[in-house]
Amino acid sequence: MAVKVCKFGGTSMADGNVINNVKSIIESDVERRFIVVSAPGKRFSGDIKVTDLLYACYDELEAEGSCEKSFAPVCNRFRAIVKELGIDINIDQILELTRRRIVKERSRDFTASRGEYLSARIMAEVLGAKFIDAEEVIFFDKNGFLDGEKSYKAISAAASGEKLAVFPGFYGKGANGKVKTFSRGGSDITGAVVARAVSATLYENWTDVSGFLACDPALVPSPKRIKMLSYKELRELSYMGANVLHADSIFPVRKANIPVQIKNTFRPQDEGTSIVPSSIYRPCGNVVTGISGKKNFTVIFIEKSLMNSEIGFMRKVLTVLEEACVSVEHVPSGIDTMSLVIANEALEGKLETLLEGIKRAVQPDTVRVIENISLISTVGHGMSSSVGTSARLFSAIADAGINIKMIDQGSSELNIMVGVSDDDYEKCIKAIYFEFFGK
Ligand code: ASP
């Protein structure tokens, strides 16, 4: 029988009412057997996510040795949820035990993980399902990365024979035996890991939007919805800022060719977006699938005559970066030029050291720094086979009066990246969208 893993995000767990809708969604399909939940999110704009309340608890604990004041709003959220649901669970006792363990563990990750823990305990009760603690089945290695093989084995053993089980998202156990979390939004990764472990036929990711849009709706009113994306397109779009799904969540499912379906808890009738392996990807008829971008990059532009024939030139430059512990996002190059595109946050106070190091290592003719650069990526499988796509892209940008400072076409021909000034970011995304999707 087909098996679906369903992950419900924070807004789907925000209050008793929504949780009851989630229950109906799960119960309407017997294939929905393994459920992963986030901590309760915002109920309205201006509300505070439980995970953020918990980070505040940890700060209070560090500063004052207890977290009494900040833990009170967490208790209020969960008590209200339990009351709305009318379930028979001793929430006061669970909350008190949680508080004591937070004080005992004194760990930021442990404290933050309790939102998902409590959410999953409640969801298991609502569904009459088995609660499987992520602490027992999701593992990290000594470098802090997910230990996939160990986790898949443990999950599959814990899930075997269960008709319906609930896992808390976002955390697992570190190599030191302590609870450790993924980065923010990491319950998406837990969902993908569980999907892989139980050999799911589908990973449904239930959120509060009806899938991916072709670009940020804050920039273009009602952009076109993307019905189908390949894993590769998703990787490009989410790496560049499209944030419906955590950028790392694709790796576990991609290896096993498990498709992902983005669904909207508040509009379950909407089709959403499917994310599929390239082998079953069907082009949507559009040359471009989506456009996304990020601000705040710095480009270090290096020029030296005969750079192309100087053996080891690139290695020497990249070694300077490695020694300064700076990761580089892109390295577009020409015959005598090489550019290093670096996120501003990775540079933090290291620019001068890098420039000195590069000058010493390769004696360039010129080194120039271009600051406040935005990268904009236009993504789509259709682009490689369609003649004139880049001409259309660059004319649209030129017609909008925008100066392109850098171009980088990924070798997969799946995307074309342009670097423009931060001030032109919004204008550039709009110009590209209107060119390929119409006004
Ligand atoms: N609750 C965590 C966060 O707010 C993880 C998640 O929701 O995926 O980031």
Image (tube, rainbow, N blue to C red):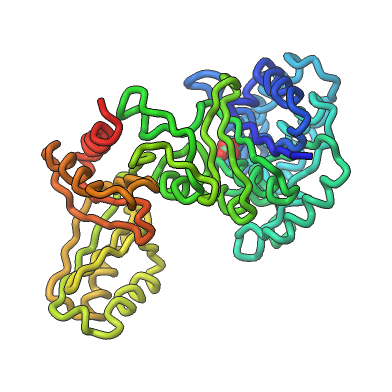
Position of 17 with respect to 63 (left or right) is right
* Residue 371 drawn above or below residue 186: below
- In the depicted view, which residue is nearer to us: 28 or 94? 28
- Work out which quarter of the rendered image holds the N terminus and state it: top right
Which residue lies at the image location 60% right of the left edge and 64% below the top edge? Answer: 143
Residue furthest right as drawn: 161
Judged from the image, the quadrant occupied by ligand 1 is top right
Residue 55 in view of the camera: no
- Work out which quarter of the rendered image holds the C terminus and state it: top left
Instruction: Give the mark count.
Output: 0
- In the depicted view, which residue is nearer to us: 263 or 95? 263
Looking at the picture, how far across and down is residue 242, in whole percent?
42, 40
Which residue lies at the image location 76% right of the left edge and 30% below the top edge? Answer: 95
Residue 242 in view of the camera: yes
Looking at the picture, how far across and down is residue 69, in whole percent?
63, 29
- In the depicted view, which residue is nearer to us: 348 or 424? 424
Looking at the picture, how far across and down is residue 348, in whole percent?
34, 57
Which residue lies at the image location 63% right of the left edge and 47% below the top edge? Answer: 258
Position of 199 with respect to 51 (left or right) is right
Looking at the picture, how far across and down is residue 118, in whole percent?
73, 33
* Residue 106 drawn above or below residue 347: above
* Residue 217 drawn above or below residue 319: above
| Residue 21, image quadrant | top right
Which residue lies at the image location 30% right of the left edge and 45% below the top edge? Answer: 295
- In the depicted view, which residue is nearer to us: 348 or 2? 2
